[in-house]
Image (tube, grey):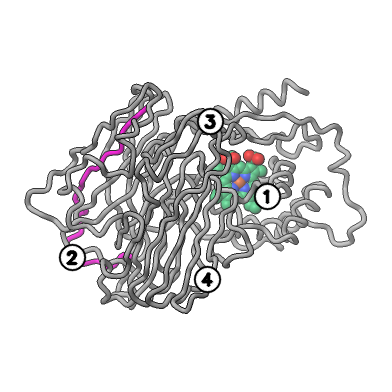
Amino acid sequence: MFESCRAHHLNFLQIHRLGTVPKPPEAPHARIVPCVMISLRTEKRGITMRAWIIGIVFGSMALAANTTSSTPVTYNKDVLPILQKNCQGCHRPGQVAPMSFLTYAEVRPWAKAMKVAVLSKKMPPWFADPQYGHFINDRSLKPSDIEIIAKWVDSGAAEGDPKDRPAPVAWPADGWEIQPDLIVRGPETAVPAHPKNNVIEWSYITVPSGITEDTWITSMQIRPSEPSVTHHICVFFKPHTPDVIYNVPYWYDRKRDESGAAVEADAGINGRGIPDSVTDGTNGIEGCYVPGQFTQDYRIFNAGKLVKAGTDIVFQIHYTPNGKETTDRPLIGFTVAKEAPQRRYVSFGISAPSDPKHFAIPPNDGNWSSPPAQAIFQQDVELVYMFPHMHVRGKDMTYKLEFPDGTTKTILSVPHYDFNWQLAYNLDQPLQIPKGTKLTVTAHYDNSANNKFNPDPNKTVYYGDMTWEEMMFPFFSIVVDKGVDARKILKPLSGRANGA
Ligand code: HEC
């Protein structure tokens, strides 16, 4: 029995490296579940490794039919609607999860693991404290849904009557999350297998968009071809200038110590050493791909972003090698409005002070409090989206508003941040923010040995670009009337604001 568990786990490890389909922890339609897996993820130098703890479940008692319930719980009637709503977004071909949950045949072998994953709240991944705010993309399960999945598994995981089955969801084709009207090809980047200290500095590369008339885009998805090495990709829209140089990367080699961390004098926020001309004329970052999040959808809020004719796209790219030489060929997909939307969607990112005097996480500190990132809204806006960003020592992040009348309101709290799942939070109702309101974002970091993702608890950690350095960079987006000048909306009090 133990050997068979081992074989499954080897398979599981391999899929993350090689991208093949994982073997479920039980054979299709098996009555006996040989083992239960709990994954531990350790993030070191950007490489995700998974260690598997093997637990052994004896016998098939757990799967004995539940005869107490008069109406049996079935896949078609009870479970599939939950999977469609909460799981298939990731668990289908071409998406982030390694196995598909579209059909009974695909789902059945995972039944037991599903019960474990939903009871432990490991799945679906969701990190917002439910006390604050309601989010339209909240995939977390209601207690009644968890109970249905558990009951279904305990009673033998039956398929049920095909007549009870809801229609399949019409997911976008070819593995897109959105169905793009327009696709732009990004720059090709060769990612070496083993650069020194595993460092590849961020670089900036400009490509033509091919957009020849003013276009309102209503959603954007960035798709690396090699997600296993992609730490992030962010994009800027830049008005075309005749002197633009396409497809040439710009980067700056920070002075680094033997472990690959930037020396104190070279710590700080990204963009250092990059010629201003590379991002001149842009309004800052328009959107990003990070693990766990790749689409910004403005349609939810009846809004769009205007991309002017002839715009060039600047890619800010960061790869973390995984020991295999590869070439990333990202794409950006856009949906396009037929008519100009009434409202404009504007993305911002602010930062805590990033100099080593203010941002230095002491060794072995399990709860270091970062100085806050702060900004003031200089006109009325509606807040729609928040996206906390830290690295592997990031522990929690909280967004708070202080209104002009002095009242305060916490609008997002992520008490257990996970670098492997950088989720964004779309508010289900836009939040009205009057002019003069102050946004304060606070965060804590765990630089102790208790943090299983910590590559070295004995180091002072400065602000920097690499996963083993730290960042405190909360993003958020607002909607305003379409005529508003994005650059005048926000006054940052700490560091860096975009208005794109
Ligand atoms: C945001 C994407 C996402 C959503 C939504 C999601 N999953 Fe997953 N799931 C993953 C990924 C990625 C993995 C691969 C393992 C990992 O990273 O831990 C996974 C792994 C699993 C596993 C394997 C066991 C384990 O513990 O690793 C099960 C079972 C599972 N998911 C069930 C579900 C169920 C049931 C739902 C819906 C109720 C769901 N997932 C929703 C992304 C998702």
Q: Crowdedness of circle 2 by 10 Å Cα count: few (<14), some, many (20+)?
A: few
Kindly check if marks 2 and 3 are in contact, taking CB atoms under 8 A apart as contact: no
Which residue: 30% across, 57% down?
182
Please identify the quarter of the rendering in which residue 141 is found: bottom right
- Under circle 3, the secondary element is loop
Could you tell which of marks 1 and 4 lies nearer the N-terminus? Answer: 1
- Under circle 1, the secondary element is loop
Which one is in front, 95 or 459?
A: 459
Which one is in front, 475 or 243?
A: 475
Could you tell which of marks 4 and 2 lies nearer the N-terminus? Answer: 2
User: The C terminus lies in which quarter of the figure?
Assistant: bottom left
Q: Amino acid at mark 2?
A: Glu
Q: Amino acid at mark 1?
A: Lys
Left or right: where 239 falls relative to 402: left
Q: Residue furthest front?
A: 357
Q: Is residue 135 visible?
A: yes
Which one is in front, 210 or 485?
A: 485
Disc 4 designates what residue? Answer: 408
Disc 1 designates what residue? Answer: 121
The mark found on residue 483 in the picture is: none
Kindly check if marks 3 and 4 are in contact, taking CB atoms under 8 A apart as contact: no
Disc 3 designates what residue? Answer: 457
- Under circle 2, the secondary element is loop
Could you tell which of marks 3 and 1 lies nearer the N-terminus? Answer: 1
Left or right: where 284 falls relative to 324: left
Which residue: 76% across, 31% down?
55
Q: Amino acid at mark 3?
A: Pro
Q: Which residues are magenta?
A: 198-217
The mark found on residue 213 in the picture is: 2
Q: Position of residue 486 (x, y in %)?
A: 28, 68
Q: Amino acid at mark 4?
A: Thr
